[in-house]
């Protein structure tokens, strides 16, 4: 007499169903990722179409409403000339993000060149570039940026170049390590065994795999660059007022910090919010890339 076999014994717990075939479950994203995404989208709208978010002309003067505290009429208050701080913050997103993105591009471009030369430059060029990166890395980033701004003069372009050069050495050491790791990998050894040329191996195998982590680092670098550029503007070495760039807003509100706190606190919180959003998205993207590679 044959018996019928069931999938599980009576009363035994059933295996949990997976959201994807093959037993792979979808990991829920933390709330911080959604919050960072919403923050980033808000600033992107402010960059692309500031007129959608502003309430008044950011340069319109109204001395009768000078130094009004945040309230229903002016969400972020007004400055010493009666200009609406909310509108100025919204219109300041474009120059601030432009400086941050430009500095990040300069920084990562220099890092790729220096890191690749240090890893693949041979017995003469490699150690020489290593020593150069170590010297730049030991030099304080802010002091190096101050030196470049003093030599080239304060402007948005100078800020982007100064911050990019100041932050490049740290990324260059990271690129060097990634290139060395990729050069000694099994797939590069297989390409050498197949007779591929060194140029093809470098172009098709080493650089793509070594530079993949920079996709996530780009987001982190933009947030860091905006903070550094705002520091230069706060010291009076950036974009000059009446620009709405966030560092310039910080510098303009410094004389009134005792009785008009919102002129410095609000732009500072905006800078922190964007830096945190960029850092959160960069970390999340990096974890996704590492999970895909594993």
Image (cartoon, rainbow, N blue to C red):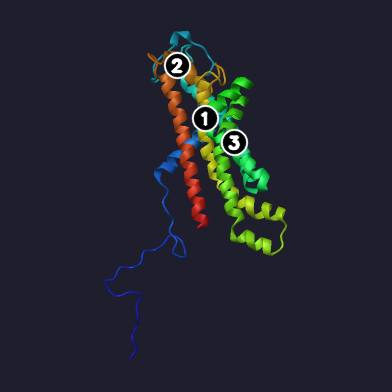
The foreground one among 119 and 294 is: 119
Q: Tag 2, which secondary structure?
A: helix
Residue 52 seen in this snapshot: no
- Distance in Å between CA atoms under marks 1 and 3: 15 Å
Task: Name the residue located 61 percent from the left edge and 60 percent from the top edge.
Answer: 187
- Give the Cα distance between marks 1 and 2: 25 Å
Picture residue at 55% right of the left edge, 35% below the top: 137
- Front: mark 3 or 2: 3
Horizontal and vertical percent position of residue 84? 47, 18
Q: Quadrant of residue 113?
A: top right
Residue 277 shows in the view: yes
Which circle, 1 or 3, is nearer the viewer?
1
Q: Given the current orientation, which residue lies at the most extreme top position? A: 64
* Label 1–label 3 contact, CB within 8 A: no
Q: Position of residue 251 (x, y in %)?
A: 49, 18
Q: Residues within 10 Å of mark 3 (few under 14, many from 20)?
A: many
Question: Mark 1 or 2 closer to N-term?
Answer: 1
Residue wearing tag 1 = 140
Near-viewer residue (258 or 235): 235
Q: Label 3, on which residue?
A: 107
In the rendered image, residue 190, in percent from the top left (x then y), is placed at: 64, 63
Answer with the quarter of the image where residue 270 lies.
top left
Position of 80 with respect to 117 (left or right) is left
The residue labelled by disc 2 is 254
Q: Which residue is more in the foreground, 47 or 162?
A: 162
């Amino acid at each position: 007499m044959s018996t019928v076999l069931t999938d599980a014994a009576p009363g035994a717990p059933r295996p949990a169903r997976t959201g994807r075939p093959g037993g792979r479950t979808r990991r829920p994203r933390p709330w911080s990722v959604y919050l960072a995404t919403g923050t980033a989208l808000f600033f992107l709208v402010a960059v692309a179409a500031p007129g959608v978010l502003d309430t008044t002309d950011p340069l319109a003067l109204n001395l009768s409403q000078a130094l009004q505290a945040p309230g229903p009429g002016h969400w972020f208050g007004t400055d010493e000339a009666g200009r609406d701080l909310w509108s100025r913050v919204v219109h300041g997103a474009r120059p601030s993000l432009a400086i941050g993105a430009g500095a990040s591009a300069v920084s990562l471009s220099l890092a790729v060149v220096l890191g690749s030369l240090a890893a693949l430059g041979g017995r003469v060029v490699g150690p020489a570039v290593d020593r150069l990166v170590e010297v730049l890395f030991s030099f304080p980033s802010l002091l190096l940026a101050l030196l470049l701004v003093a030599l080239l003069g304060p402007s948005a372009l100078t800020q982007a170049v100064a911050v990019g050069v100041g932050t490049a050495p740290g990324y260059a050491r990271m690129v060097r390590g990634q290139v060395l790791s990729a050069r000694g990998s099994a797939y590069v050894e297989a390409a050498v065994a197949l007779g591929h040329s060194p140029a093809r191996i470098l172009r098709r195998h080493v650089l793509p795999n070594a530079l993949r982590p920079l996709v996530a680092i780009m987001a982190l670098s933009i947030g860091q660059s905006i903070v550094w550029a705002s520091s230069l503007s706060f010291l009076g070495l950036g974009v000059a007022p009446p620009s709405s760039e966030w560092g310039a807003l910080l510098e303009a509100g410094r004389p009134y910090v005792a009785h008009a706190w919102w002129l410095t606190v609000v732009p500072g919180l905006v800078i922190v919010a964007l830096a945190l959003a960029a850092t959160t998205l960069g970390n999340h993207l990096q974890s996704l890339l590492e999970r895909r590679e594993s």
